[in-house]
Image (spheres, rainbow, N blue to C red):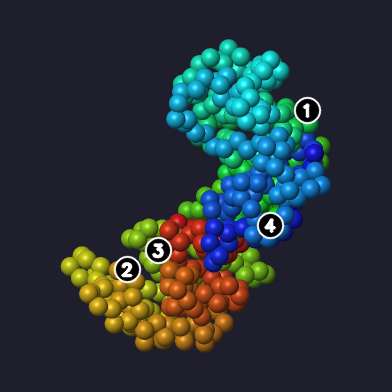
Amino acid sequence: MELEAKGLFFSYSPDKPVLQDISFHLEPGELLFVLGRNGSGKTTLLSCLNGIFTPSAGEVILDGKDIASYRAVDRARRIGLIPQLHTPTFAYSVREIVLMGRSPHLSLFGAPGLEDMAIVDEALETVGLVDLQHRPYTQLSGGEQQLVLIARGLAQKCNILLMDEPSAHLDLSNQYQVLEMIDQLAKQGLSFIISSHSPNNALAYAKRVLLLQNGRVMAYGELEETLTEPLLSAAYGLKTEVIYKKENGTATPQAILPRRPLAISPASMADPDSDLSCILERSCDTPQLVVVTGLSGAGKTTWCREMVKHAKAKGLTVGGLLSPAVFEEGRKTGIDLIDLVSGEQRPLAKLRGETVSGVGTAQWDLDPEVIAWGDAILTEQPDCDILVLDELGPLEFFRKEGFLSGLALIDQKQFRAAFVVVRSSLLPFAQQRWPYAHIVTA
C-alpha cells in the first residue's frame, strides 16, 4: 500500500503556516525518516498523514484515494500512529494496551474474539514481550514501553505505521532494540514514516529522508542526497561534519557530528600552518567568514583587537568597526564605536534608563547618530584584506535596525576575510544564515 503527499499546506492560525507545499511518497516496505529542528512541522505532518488534521491545501493519497474519503475506522485499518512515550491514566497491562490496537476491527459494542486474541499473541511474540504481557505498562522501561506501542500497531494490522520520535528519551541500548525491530518489520513489508531528531539513526536505518526546515521541504531523497554537511548545517543551524569510512575505494558515511567551534588564538597568525593562517590563505581565492562568539564578558572584542594587531604586523589592511566596552569603577556603563581605518572613536551606547532616547535594547540606549555614522563607514568601506564587525546582534537579525550595511556586506560576501562578532544566543541564527562560516570561541 502506497502513501503520497501532494502539496500539503497546514496552519493552526491563518497567519502562521506550519506546513508549506510538502510532497513525497512512501513505497511498500519503506522506512522513511523525517528530520528537522524543533518546530519544523514533523509531528503536524504525521497528524495530517493520519487524517487527524485536514490540510488547508493539497492532499494525502492512500492506495490511490484521498485519505479524506476514508471513514475513520477504515483509515485506522490502514495507517497506525504511534505517539511519543506517554503515561496512560490507568495502569493497563501490556496485553490490554496491545489489545487496544484491535479497536478498528471491532463493531461499536463488539468484544474481542479468539481471532483478536491470536493477533495480540502474535504481536507480543514478534516484539518479544510475551513474558511481560501481564505487567502494568507504567512499570516498564522506556524501551519496553516503545515496543508495546509497536506491538499495538502490529495488532492493528495496518500497512503503514507513523512513529513520532520513537527513540526519544531512550538510552543507546533501547534505541538500538527499538530501531532494529522497526528495521526487521520493514523488511517484512510494513512501511514506516519516522519523525526523529537523530540524523545518525536515519543514516543507519532509512532508505530515504525528508528534511524539513520551517515547514518546508529542504531536501527529499536518498541518503547521499540529503544527509550532506551543507544541508544538515543549514537545517539545524550549526556546523555539522559527516564522518566517512573508506573501503575498497568507496567512501561510506558512518556518523554525523556537530562541529565544535575552533579555539584559535590571534597570535597563531604568526604560524603559517595554523588554522587562522590557513583561513586567511584561502581568502585569497574565496571569501572567508569567521564568526567570533561567546557569552557577555568572554572577551570577543579583545580577541578582535588582538587579531587586528597581528594582522597589521603581517602587513594586512584592516577595516570595519570595533565596539569596546566602557567601564567606570569596574562596572560596564557604556559602549564605544571605533572606525578601524581612521581610528576615530565615538560613544555608541549607555546603560538604559527609564526612557530610551535612541535605539533601545533590553540593556542599552544606543545613539542613532553614531549608528548612522558607523553604517556610513561600512557603506563606504574601502577594499581591505580583513573586515571586522563587532558586533551584529538582535537589531540587525530581527529588527532591521543597526548596522544593516554590515549585514549586507556579509550576506553578499563583499569581503576577502571577515570577522563578525555574534553573541552565543544568536549563534544558531548566524550559522543558519551563513552555513559556510568558521566558528571561533573567544
Choose between 340 and 185: the one closer to the eye: 185
Examine the image and state in which quarter residue 176 appears.
top right
Residue at (66% x, 69% y) in the render: 286
| Residue pointed to by mark 2 | 362
Residue at (66% x, 32% y) in the render: 104
Q: Is residue 154 visible?
A: yes
**Vertical order, 310 against 414 (above or below):** above
Is residue 187 left or right of 309 when viewed as pictured?
right
* Residue 30 in the image, given as x and y percentages of width and height: 76, 38
Instruction: Mark 3 or mark 2: name the one nearer the start of the chain.
Output: 3
Examine the image and state in which quarter residue 71 appears.
top right
Instruction: Mark 4 or mark 1: name the one nearer the start of the chain.
Output: 4
Q: Which mark is residue 8?
A: 4
Q: Which mark is residue 188?
A: 1
Circle 3 sits in a helix, a strand or a loop, which is it?
Answer: helix
Examine the image and state in which quarter residue 363 appears.
bottom left
Measure the alpha-carbon separation of dots 2 and 4. 40 Å
Please tell me how crowded label 4 is: few (under 14), some (14-19), or many (20+) other residues with Cα within 10 Å: many
* Residue 138 in the image, given as x and y percentages of width and height: 46, 24
Q: Nearer the viewer, mark 4 or mark 1?
A: 4
Give amino acid for label 1. Answer: Gln
| Residue pointed to by mark 3 | 300
Circle 2 sits in a helix, a strand or a loop, which is it?
Answer: loop
Choose between 205 and 138: the one closer to the eye: 138
Residue at (60% x, 17% y) in the render: 129
Circle 1 sits in a helix, a strand or a loop, which is it?
Answer: loop
Check if mark 3's residue and mark 4's residue have beta carbons within 8 Å: no
Instruction: Mark 2 or mark 4: name the one nearer the start of the chain.
Output: 4
**Vertical order, 46 against 106 (above or below):** below
Give amino acid for label 4. Answer: Leu
